[in-house]
Image (spheres, rainbow, N blue to C red):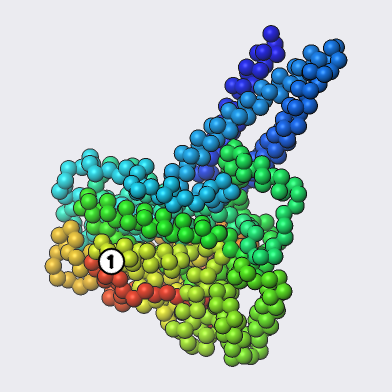
Amino acid sequence: MPIRRMARLAVVVVPIAVVLTLLIFLVNDQLDKPGFWRVALVLILTMEAAYIAVSAYMIVGIPVLAVLVVRGRRGKRTAVARVLLATLSLAAGLLAAEAVAAAWLRLSGRASVVPVGGIGRKLRIDREQIWPAVSLEDVRLPTRFEDPPGDSDIDIVVVGESSAEGVPFSDWLSIGRLVEWKLNEVMPGRRVNVQILAISGSILEHQHRKLAELRRRPDLLIVYCGHNEFSSRLNGARDLPYYVDDREPSGWQMVCERVESASSLCEIIRRTKEKCRLEIPPPPGGERDLVDRPAYTGEEYSLILADFRRRLEAIVTWGERIGATTVLIPPPGNDAGYEPNRSFLPASTTRDRRESFRRAFLAARDLEQADAPAAIAAYRALIDREPGFAEAHYRLGVLLDAAGDAEESYRQFTAARDGDGYPMRCLVAFQDVYREVAAKHRAVLVDAQAEFHAVGNRGRLDDEMFQDAMHPSLRGQIALAQVVLRELKARRAFGWPEGGPPPTIDPRACTDHFRIGPAGWKKVCLWGVHFGNFCEWLRYDPTPRRERRLIYAKAYDRLVAGEPVEAMNLPNLGTPRPVPATAGTSTTSGSPGPAARSHDTTLLTPKRSPHR
């Protein structure tokens, strides 16, 4: 009978179609074309609306149709029964899809402590469930390898995200490739191999699992990861009900939330929407409020930090077990040249108090040009009033830096970075995890924050050391690689020969060796334009980032016109000044140097130009 065939087909096809559609979006996360993700987002939103509409229809329709079948006229009962049968078939298909979705969520919950989109409404924080007694039991790292123990090759493995990958210099060099180059010079009789597991957008969770793919035993394991722990999980437009007087959701929003909280399929749809939104730059005109709200909840922050600590501990313990020399690099950020994305007040702050603080902040900012000392005093008063407001620390750091107070401005910039409500740079708490784990396991600690503070211009972590918010410039890459080499020499790792000066990397020899010519600097400029496009609208005032983007665009046009890169007169284009051989403070054996908790801010300005 056709009806029966249709019913059987619906039961089989509907859940398969739904699950396959979702899987396409869930696994196809390597594409970075915003147009594709916009189309995907529209499809997902359509699917969500259709699901809610169909669910509402079935809740109301099945009882009504059943009553009509029982009490309706004989002539119409057959037609109504067919409709009821089709509706029941659809319901069976959706229930099957819900069962598959529930199984998927259970499986993915074991892989990620906080999935893309946040912990959602369905997850209840049960630490025993999320962190079982046998820690990280789903990640099996290898202890047997294809290469024989004690072979003469030196295998380097680099774990991390885009900074460790070398972005925007990844077509030419990275920290791992710089170390490989110099080790080949120091030990000419041995072959040095480098394998870069680091990939843009990755988090430590992903990198931990990628280590399971290794086939050769790493002799040197470099871990440089931490910028993406929030921004790769949460999209930049995420808004949460944070303040005590946030508006109550509308009736329709409450209905949607209740359906989503009861549905595993809707939870997967929600996560997939967030994955799409992560790939789409916020639209122009979407500036944030000055007094904003954090993009994460307190529970999410605690879960991410605790899981980061556990995974780093597991990776270092594994490195010890297989006999690798482990180098930990807590990622530094462009403290002086990049503003915080979001600044927020305590959740208990009422709307009137937020508005009062906003007016006071804008009044302080109006004083900056006319009366800098008065502006400094005003910002100090605002910080005394609300110590966690990142933008106040940032603006105070700018003024103190211009006044010549390098150390105090450094501390203010660190506080601004650490108070960012949408972190795109590694926070102090995560840097401290590196320091703690290194000290516990006597791993090599390259305290990059302290190292950059030691070698930067007037101690600043700014555009000389970075290309953007977090990716090191060529000078920054050289500085980090040079410290790694210095620490390896201090340990006489891999039979490092005695004597000789501390290892250094000559910037001119570096650009020649890796062939970073005019085409390379053009690509670096295009990266600056791309980064600006993506990050410009993440804060209340996009002007500084827009200006920085335009500087890169103009530099690119000038390079295309044939001007030499040195004529750009920018701190992170062209061959940089050398990095002193022993200027930093990192130490071998995991003894952490001074914790450089700071944040520096200078706009992308020409070399030797006064800070503005």
Residue appearing at x 61%, y 67% in the figure: 347
Horizontal and vertical percent position of residue 285: 71, 61
Horizontal and vertical percent position of residue 128: 41, 49
Residue 430 lies in what quarter of the image?
A: bottom left
Q: Residue furthest front?
A: 71
Front residue of 171/21: it is 21
For badge 1, the amino acid type reads Ala
Rendered position, 488 above or below 400: above
Residue 453 at least partly seen:
yes
**Which quadrant is the C terminus positioned in?**
bottom right
Rendered position, 460 above or below 310: below
Q: Residue furthest left?
A: 498
Rendered position, 489 above or below 16: below
Residue 514 at least partly seen:
no
Residue 357 lies in what quarter of the image?
A: bottom right
Horizontal and vertical percent position of residue 460: 44, 77
Front residue of 128/130: it is 128
**As drawn, is 342 to the left or to the right of 589?**
right
**Which quadrant is the N terminus positioned in?**
top right
Residue appearing at x 49%, y 82% in the figure: 409
Residue appearing at x 47%, y 84% in the figure: 408
Residue beneath disc 1? 439
